[in-house]
Structures are given as structure tokens and as C-alpha cells.
Amino acid sequence: MAEPLLSPAAAAARTGAAARIRTLVRLRFVVMWNTLRRHPWQLVGAIIGALYGLGVLGLVLFGLVALAIGAADLARTVLILAGAGLILGWALAPILSTGMDRTLDPARLASMPMPPAVQLTGIAVASLLGIPGIVTLLLSAGTAIAWFRSPGAMIAAVVLAPVAAATCVLACQFTVTAFSRAAGHRRFREIIGALVLLLLVPVGPLLSVASQGVAAIADRLPVIADALSWSPLGAVWAVPAEIAAGAFPAAIMKLVIALATPVALCFAWAGLYRANLGSVAGGSHTSARSGLGWLGRFPASPRGAVAARALTYWLRDPRYLQSLIVVLVMPIVFGFMAASTSLPIMLPGSTVLVAALLALSTFTDISYDGTAFSVHVLRGVRGIDDRLGRVWANAIVAVPLIAVVAVVTTALVGRFDQLLTLAGLTAVITLGGFGVASVASAVFVMPVPQAGENPFASKPGAGMLSLVGMAGSYGALTVLALPTIACTIAAGVTGRPLWAWVTLAVGVVTGIAACWGGVRWGAAIFDRKAADLFARVKSQG
């Protein structure tokens, strides 16, 4: 009879809960490393992200040293408010991005022979060992610096650092799981994305207005911090403060709240996780529409088919819809700036930025196609048809929106005498942007959210590559627009109608030439590198 290769104790050690948790954590980092190794720009982005995290850590530690020198009441207020903001930020982060530890999500673990408790522990540990988790843990422990005058408070801050970090991680995972089922529906993602954008785009102007009232509420910040210290958001940060102040009964009660918070989050997360396992296993449901849609309304030609599919993306894909929301909110932002600087002409000037954002939006068209781009390669679509089809669809959406923004903003400030000048500058930006994007999208393949993913999801390296590509695109567009910009300045300085007509003519002619030249150049690149483009698109998925 064959002898077992491993003793029962050794076999249990290799297949026990701890071993499976280690396997999950190792799996997460193996997948991440393979992804970064396959995409050099993502590796560069990850390194920059790590350096950024270290920089933030250094700045915060410097601030903690400053708090240690100051009054204890100030340290208490700042640490409780900042700590509560940190936990709240972790809880809200998944709404903006699904790029946080999604290697170990329920959809990918449903078929693995592991109990839910093991899966939950593995996800939590892997999240804690990521760059954000490690930085949070170090920051939590670093708050001990602010209490160097009280050894008991310092010890409490260090001991409670893992509790604070665990609270942040569990709050994040609870939000991820709570939104996972609803986020499976496209309409839900569109609504959430629209709401977030509408809230985030005007943040700058709103903060500038709100900053004027900070002095008025500064005296109430300690009261707010005291209220938060009795909540799950602030209790863990308030315990060292109470020990430093000698309020031991309050410290004990807040310690109970601090310890109960991650326990409660753990139970709530486990319940949602188990409830979602069934829905994950059951798959998702999709619905189809009858008819050809936009394909039946465009000419039966390759460029007509490309235009129809691209227009469908513009009207139904959340990744494109978020771009439309941004450019529509831009005039509001410029309206705030115009009001605060007493320069009303800045409001119609927002039309130029709207035109640039819309015209250059096809920069990521091929990246957004994903594996659907294989149809263009396998069917031998010519570069000129691909480029013109995408510009066609973009123009159908962009040109009417740009015209409406130009007329409405000009009417609001009563400067119709500048409309011809604005039209010339907008024409070269729009048409030139179509040409520049036609070239750039045939050269760059961006790491972008795939179809069905959160449009706010980001991938390591995407920021750096996007920065390089967009800097080149905007730089090229600026160079193309220089003659028109010079005419615009001349029209503004002299005030002569002749210069306004010259600006319009130069803008239209330059824009048409730039658009046609860019389309032809992009088409030539496409014809030479279509297969390579598809290989890069497929590898980023």
C-alpha cells in the first residue's frame, strides 16, 4: 500500500486557511507584477505612484512634527478631522475608481474552492499590503509623533495604527461589495459617473468661494472634531488625544468604539459578500435592441459603418458620456472665473476649451475599441475610411455642441461683436483637433478602462502615457492655431471688423488644411501599423 507523501500535519499546513490566504495574497502580487512587466509605462506609473506616496508620507510626517511643537488642542483637532477624512476617503474611493485590488474580487474567486471567510481575509490582507494600505498604516503609526510629550498617548497611537488601517481597508471593501451588484448595470454606472463628474468639475471654483468662509468657521472646528471623536470616523484618532489630556474614562469609551468599528465593518462586509456570491455565479443579464440602429442610417460603406459604430459609442458608452458632461460643465467653471476676475470675456472663451476637448477626444478611440478593433484589421478597413469615419461621428456630436456654447456664452456677456473672431479661433481648434487626433490615435494606445468597467478606473502607467500623448497633441494643436491666435489678438487690440473677418477666414482655411492633412497622415500610419495597433490594444486588456 502506497505511503502518503506528506504527513497529515504537513498536508494540513499546506492546505489550511493560512496557506490559502498566503496563496491569495501572493496571487494578487504575481498578477500585478506580470501586468507591470508586460506594460513598461504602467511600471513607470506604479513607480511614480510609490514615490508620490512616499512624498505624501514625508510631508505628513513633517506636519506631525509641527503639531508636536504646537498646542495639544490644535493637534487633537487636526488629527481627528484629518483621520476622519482619511477613513471617509477610503470608503468613497471605490465610487471613483474600481482599480483597487480588483484582482481578488468575488467574480474571480467564485469558482475557487475556498470558504468565504478565507477569501475575505485574503482580500483584506492583500489590500492592506498595497501601496495605499502601507502608507495608511505608516501614517497612522506616525501620529504618535504629535504626542511625544505623553508616552501613554504615543504607545496608544502606535498600538491603534493597525486598527485605523484595518478600518480604512474594511470601509473600502464594504463599499466595493455594496456597489458591485448595482454596478453590474450599465445605467447605474452612467448615473453614478454623471453625478460624480457634476460634483467634481466645479470643485475648484466652489472651493475658492468656500475658502473665504473658512475663517468664519475656524472657531467651530474643535467642536466638530469633538463630535467626530465619538463616531466611527474619529474615535480611533481621539483615543491618544484623550490619554494625553488625562481623560481616561472618555479614552476607554472611545477605544470601545474604535475597536467595534472594524468588527462591525467586517460582519457587514461578510454578509454582503456572501449575498453577492450567488449573483456572481448567476452571471449578468444583457438586453438587445432590434434593428440596425445607427448602422441603418449611415451609408453602406466602410467609413459609414465606422462612423455609425463610433456614434453609437458617443451616445451609449459611459466612457464617452463622461467627456460630454465635462465639456458641458466647463462654461460653468469659466463663469465662476469670469465673475471672480471681472473679465466677462472669459465666459465665451470657454468655447475654445470645449472645442479642444471634444475634437481631441478621439485620441483614445482605438484604445476604447478594445478587442472590437480586430474587425477593422481582419476586414482590411483602409486607414482613410477608419480616420474619416471616426471624425464624421465626432463632428456630428461636437460641432452642434460647440456652436451652442459659443452663441449662448456670447449672448450672456453681450459681446456679439466678438462672435466672428471666436468662430475663427474655434474653427481652427475644432478642425485642427480632428486632424491631430487622427494622427495621435494611430500612434498611441492608452491603458484605458475596458467596456463595461467603471469609466473612472485607472491603470498603472495610464497617467504618464496619457500625459505624454496629450501634451504632444495639445502642443501640436497650439502650433497649428498660432496664425489664427495672432489674428485674434490683432482683432482684439485694433477693434476693427476687418480683422474679425480675417480671423474667421484664416481659422477656417487653416483648420480644413490641418484636418485633411492629419487624416491623410493618420491613415498612412494606420495602414502600416494596423496589426501592431491591435496587438497593443489586446495586450492592455
Image (spheres, helix red, strand yellow):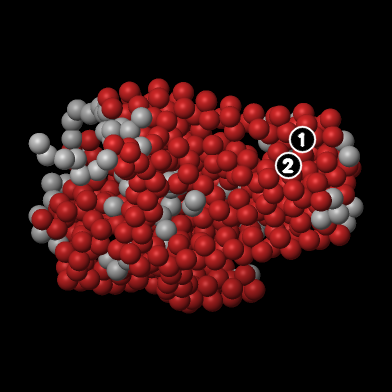
Closest to the observer: 266 or 520?
A: 266
Amino acid residing under circle 2:
Trp
Could you tell me if residue 508 is visible in this image? no
Indicate the secondary structure of the residue bearing disc 2: helix
**Mark 1, other Cα within 10 Å: few <14 / some 14–19 / many ≥20:** many
The residue positioned 49% from the left and 76% from the top of the image is: 482
Mark 1–mark 2 distance (CA, rounded to whole Å) = 7 Å
Q: Nearer the viewer, residue 240 or 278?
A: 240
- Choose between 29 and 272: the one closer to the eye: 29
Q: Amino acid at mark 1?
A: Ser
**Rendering coords of residue 370 (x, y %):** 26, 51
Quadrant placement of the N terminus: top left
Vertical relation: 199 (above or below) 403: above
* Number of marks in picture: 2
Tell me the tag on residue 237. 2
**Residue at horizontal 74 percent and vertical 44 percent from the top:** 156
Residue 166 in percent (x, y) is at 58, 41
Q: What residue is pinned by disc 1? A: 229
- Residue at the (85%, 45%) spot, across then down: 244
Decide: marks 1, 2 in contact (CB < 8 A)?
yes
Q: Is residue 482 left or right of residue 393?
A: right
Quarter-wise, where is residue 459 in the image? bottom left
